[in-house]
Image: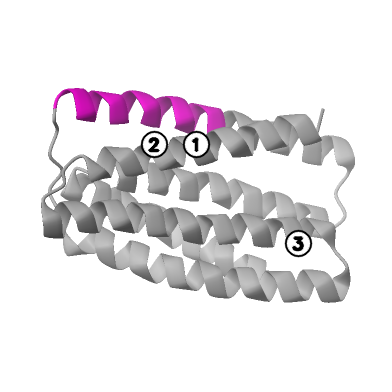
């Protein structure tokens, strides 16, 4: 149930974040939306695993998710570097700030539920997904801080720096996927 709620929130989030990224002209919001798209795939892998799918199919799905994280890291690296170099100023709007605020709280609540359920079931995949959900909450906080710093302090450079936080996360996730499934 918790995984279905996470999946549903991420599906809704992709649409909201796509709209907010265009409205805000925000690299961090666009990156967070792309990360949500990747997390939809990760949630599907967890649901697949809980349904008893075979190892080869799961490994292939994980590799695709790993490649998506690499693509996300490359995209955000280029966009964030370009924004810093050209002193690009995103337009602050309540949409990105509101969505990332709600997402941060929800992800921490869902992560706690997944951790409890994973411990009760002694399911390492669900425990790992709970850690990923915690990281999603932390990423939402990082993006939120960048958006708020831009909106309230005029720190335009905070948005692309938040993009680099997502780059780091995407790199860590890709490395983890490829080293654990090798």
Q: Quadrant of the C terminus?
A: top right
- 31 or 135: nearer the viewer: 135
Q: Which mark is residue 168?
A: 1
Which stretch appears magenta? 69-86
Q: CA distance from mark 2 to mark 1?
A: 6 Å
- Please say whether residue 1 is visible from this viewpoint: no
The secondary structure making up most of the magenta span is helix
Could you tell whether 164 is left or right of 113 in the image?
Answer: left
Secondary structure state at the residue bearing disc 3: helix
163 sits to left or right of 113: left
Disc 2 vs disc 1: Cβ atoms closer than 8 Å? yes
Q: Which residue is mark 2?
A: 164
Residue at x 14%, y 33% (from the top left corner):
88
Q: Nearer the viewer, mark 3 or mark 1?
A: 1
Q: Earlier in the sequence, mark 3 or mark 2?
A: 3
Query: Which numbered dot is residue 126?
Result: 3
Rendered location of residue 133, percent (x, y): 59, 60
């Amino acid at each position: 149930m918790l995984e279905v709620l996470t999946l549903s929130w991420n599906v809704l989030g992709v649409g909201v974040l796509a709209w907010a990224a265009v409205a805000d002209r925000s690299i961090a919001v666009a990156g967070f939306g792309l990360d949500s798209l990747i997390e939809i795939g990760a949630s599907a892998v967890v649901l697949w695993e809980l349904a008893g799918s075979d190892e080869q199919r799961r490994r292939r799905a994980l590799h695709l998710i790993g490649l998506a994280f690499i693509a996300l890291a490359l995209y955000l690296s280029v966009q964030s570097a370009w924004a810093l170099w050209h002193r690009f100023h995103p337009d602050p709007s309540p949409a990105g700030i509101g969505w990332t605020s709600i997402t941060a709280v929800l992800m921490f609540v869902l992560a706690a539920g997944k951790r409890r359920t994973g411990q009760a079931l002694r399911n390492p995949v669900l425990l790992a997904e709970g850690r990923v959900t915690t990281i999603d909450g932390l990423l939402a906080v990082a993006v939120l801080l960048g958006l708020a710093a831009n909106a309230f302090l005029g720190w335009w450079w905070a948005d692309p720096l938040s993009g680099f936080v997502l780059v780091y996360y995407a790199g860590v996730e890709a490395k983890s996927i490829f080293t654990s499934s090798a």
